């Protein structure tokens, strides 16, 4: 159940005229920071500015949001896709990083904060403010977040620009998600993001890198029955990739044979693509 302050911001037709109402309610708000978060979600820079000026919340204050997560105003704005508010907070001294378990860029990319023609420019502004292009091991990296954003419907053209910019600024091309899946493997899993796999390979992604299950990108391409990507990766991979075994003992061709996504026709096409590289080891 929302508190009166949160409800007022959430339901107002125009939050700009709420300053006096909120001033009267703040003394009774158990978590006044949540009102500021609601102002961010509504995209009301003016109301957020008022709450900060009234010292309801500080631009760098850490607090627990309504979902029980430790957060900051910058993190909430990035996650809500409100770049104009992110920019405002940066101008007022907000730190964009600071939460140990979450990358600011990953949050912004998945939140839709960097979109359209200015996607790379806006991301660059956040990087200049201190956001890292990499993330600690065990957390979602910006590159992996970019791939997942395509899974969720982000424009692949925007994401290509974001990936190119991240790599140019030192992002680890082999970086992973929280479960240890590299960006290239993630790109191959979903049909929406398979074009992004080409972008990653062109940028230098390792076609022999293993995921948390010991699978190479070729294992993944074979399992999803993507003949086009299988062809691209097979050309980029040395011969040992075809006989490499995952932690469960499967080669890429085992993955293809066991997958419901792979038809007899597509499997034969894969064999045709690699006929000069197939050996008995591929099936052992």
Image (cartoon, rainbow, N blue to C red):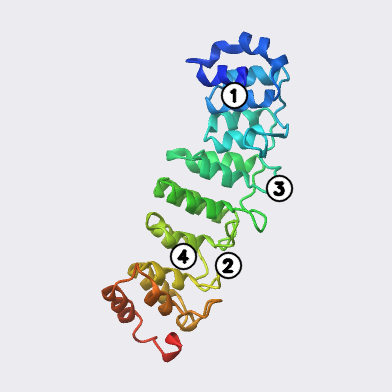
- Circle 4 crowding by C-alpha within 10 Å: few under 14, some 14–19, many from 20: some
Give the Cα separation between the discs numbered 4 and 2.
19 Å
Give the Cα separation between the discs numbered 4 and 3.
30 Å
Q: Measuring 43% from the left and 51% from the top, which residue is drawn there? A: 151
Give the Cα separation between the discs numbered 3 and 1.
28 Å
Secondary element at tag 4: helix
**Nearest to N terminus: mark 1 or mark 4:** 1
Q: Which sits in the foreground, 152 or 183? A: 152
In the rendered view, tell whether residue 155 sits above or below residue 173: above
In the rendered view, tell whether residue 184 sits above or below residue 279: above
Q: Which sits in the foreground, 82 or 93? A: 82
> Foreground mark, 2 or 1?
1
- Dividing the image into 4 quarters, which one contains the N terminus? top right
> Foreground mark, 4 or 3?
3
The image quarter containing residue 55 is top right
The image quarter containing residue 30 is top right
Q: Measuring 48% from the left and 54% from the top, which residue is drawn there? A: 147
Disc 4 target residue: 201
Q: Which sits in the foreground, 204 or 233? A: 233
**Nearest to N terminus: mark 2 or mark 3:** 3
Of the numbered discs in the image, which one, if any, rests on residue 212? 2
Disc 3 target residue: 100
Disc 1 target residue: 2
């Amino acid at each position: 159940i929302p508190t009166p302050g949160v409800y007022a911001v959430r339901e107002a037709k125009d939050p700009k005229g709420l300053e006096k109402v909120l001033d009267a309610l703040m003394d009774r708000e158990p978590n006044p920071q949540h009102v500021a978060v609601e102002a961010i979600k509504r995209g009301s820079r003016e109301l957020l500015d008022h709450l900060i000026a009234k010292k309801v919340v500080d631009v760098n204050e850490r607090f627990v949001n309504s979902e029980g997560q430790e957060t900051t105003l910058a993190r909430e704005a990035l996650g809500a896709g409100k770049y104009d508010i992110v920019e405002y907070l940066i101008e007022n001294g907000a730190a964009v990083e600071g939460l140990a378990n979450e990358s600011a860029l990953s949050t912004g990319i998945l939140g839709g904060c960097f979109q359209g023609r200015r996607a790379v420019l806006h991301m660059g502004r956040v990087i200049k403010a201190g956001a890292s292009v990499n993330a600690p091991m065990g957390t979602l990296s910006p590159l992996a977040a970019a791939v997942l954003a395509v899974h969720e419907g982000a424009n692949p053209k925007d994401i290509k620009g974001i990936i190119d910019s991240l790599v140019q600024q030192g992002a680890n091309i082999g970086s992973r998600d929280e479960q240890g899946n590299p960006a290239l493997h993630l790109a191959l899993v979903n049909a929406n993001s398979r074009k992004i796999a080409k972008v990653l390979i062109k940028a230098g992604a390792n076609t022999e890198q293993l995921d948390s299950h010991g699978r190479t990108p070729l294992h993944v391409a074979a399992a999803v029955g993507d003949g086009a990507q299988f062809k691209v990766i097979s050309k980029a991979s040395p011969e040992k990739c075809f006989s490499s075994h995952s932690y469960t003992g499967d080669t890429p061709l085992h993955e293809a044979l066991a997958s419901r996504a792979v038809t007899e026709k597509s499997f034969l096409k894969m064999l045709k693509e690699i006929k000069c590289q197939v050996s008995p080891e591929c099936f052992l």
